[in-house]
Amino acid sequence: MTALLSLEGLTKTFQTRRGSVRAVDGLDLEVRSGETLGLVGESGCGKSTTGRMLVRLLDPTSGRITFDGTDITALPQRRMRPLRSELQIVFQDPYSSLNPRQTVASIVGAPLRVQGVPVAEAHARVREMLGLVGLDAEHAGRYPHEFSGGQAQRIGIARALVTRPRLVVADEPVSALDVSIQAQIVNLLSGLRRELDLALVLIAHDLAVVRHVCARVAVMYLGRIVEIGDRDAIYDAPAHPYTRALLSAIPLPDPVAERARERIVLRGDPPSPASPPSGCPFHPRCHKAESRCRVERPVLSRVAGREVACHFPETS
Ligand code: SF4
Ligand code: MG
């Protein structure tokens, strides 16, 4: 698989009252054509900021974004317009991301209007898209508040997919929804991804959802990737102590296995990106930390079939 989109040395700094905060810190990442990549980590680790930069909704402070061989880092919004149809995003909260004064047809058709698609063709494509996400043609004239959260997210998905993009970022697409319908929406997104053969970057703090949907997983901590690799490598034998801790918090379905397994409790909250720790940024919370970890920052290197940023990765 070739890289559809790549991020090189991507950094995003925000100015806050407490000084400058580096939300994303020199991140390298490739998204391949047609792949499913999960981006996981605790809240505040820079997942959403990365997702927004991936689709150029947010400008990076430095670094480079390449899409399909073209450097799009500094492309002005006017020149981004043709690319908008290729790079789309599904937001966490369907209601706040849908204009309450527009009908469903108008919301889902908006990306087609931007592309200058003729009205009759746009109309047909909106109807087709509504069908694909499981809504009826009669829903087209209604307004977002007339829908449940799950249906509203179907509208958000229809809007993201109507231009047949090559890459969709879904930022916590089900975490604002009722637990009982989360699986339906995840399965819908995952099924449409397969059907339309697009690359999906799924941002989630729920590692079970990512395991279900994504073939490759990247774990973020304080604006950087600390471990990245194929799903089975990451889930079956996590090498980074942070990944191990995150995975040990997922309950196992078998109660015997659940009682027997080791649970790694993370000490405290993630440190503020405004004042990141020295050396390995994870060292204040790491049960394996040694003196080297406090002074020397580990870089991603290949260990046991994945890449991991740790001086003492687990290899069993
Ligand atoms: Fe823990 Fe050291 Fe590895 Fe960082 S480098 S994750 S502190 S063992
Ligand atoms: Mg977020």
Image (cartoon, helix red, strand yellow):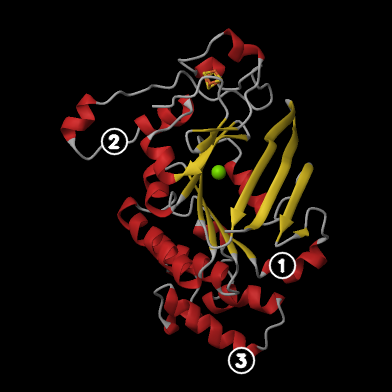
Name the residue tied to disc 2. 251
Name the residue tied to disc 3. 120
Pointers 3 and 2 in contact (CB under 8 A)? no
Label 3 – label 1 distance at C-alpha: 22 Å
Left/right placement of residue 27 relative to residue 32 reads: right
In the rendered structure, which disc, 3 or 2, sits on the residue that comes first in sequence?
Answer: 3
In the rendered structure, which disc, 1 or 2, sits on the residue that comes first in sequence?
Answer: 1
User: Disc 3 or disc 1, which is closer to the eye?
Assistant: 1
Pointers 3 and 1 in contact (CB under 8 A)? no
Label 1 Cα crowd, 10 Å radius (few <14 / some 14-19 / many 20+): some
Query: Where on the picture, by quarter, is residue 99?
Result: bottom right
Left/right placement of residue 70 relative to residue 5 reads: right
Amino acid tagged 2: Pro
Given the current orientation, which residue lies at the most extreme left position? 256
Pointers 1 and 2 in contact (CB under 8 A)? no
The residue at the point 61 percent across, 22 percent down is 281
Name the residue tied to disc 1. 83
Q: Secondary structure at mark 1?
A: helix
Quadrant of picture, ligand 2: top right
Residue 293 in the image: x percent, y percent?
A: 59, 14
Label 1 – label 2 distance at C-alpha: 41 Å
Q: Quadrant of the N terminus?
A: bottom right
Residue 90 in sight in this render = no
Residue 288 in the image: x percent, y percent?
A: 47, 15
Label 2 Cα crowd, 10 Å radius (few <14 / some 14-19 / many 20+): some
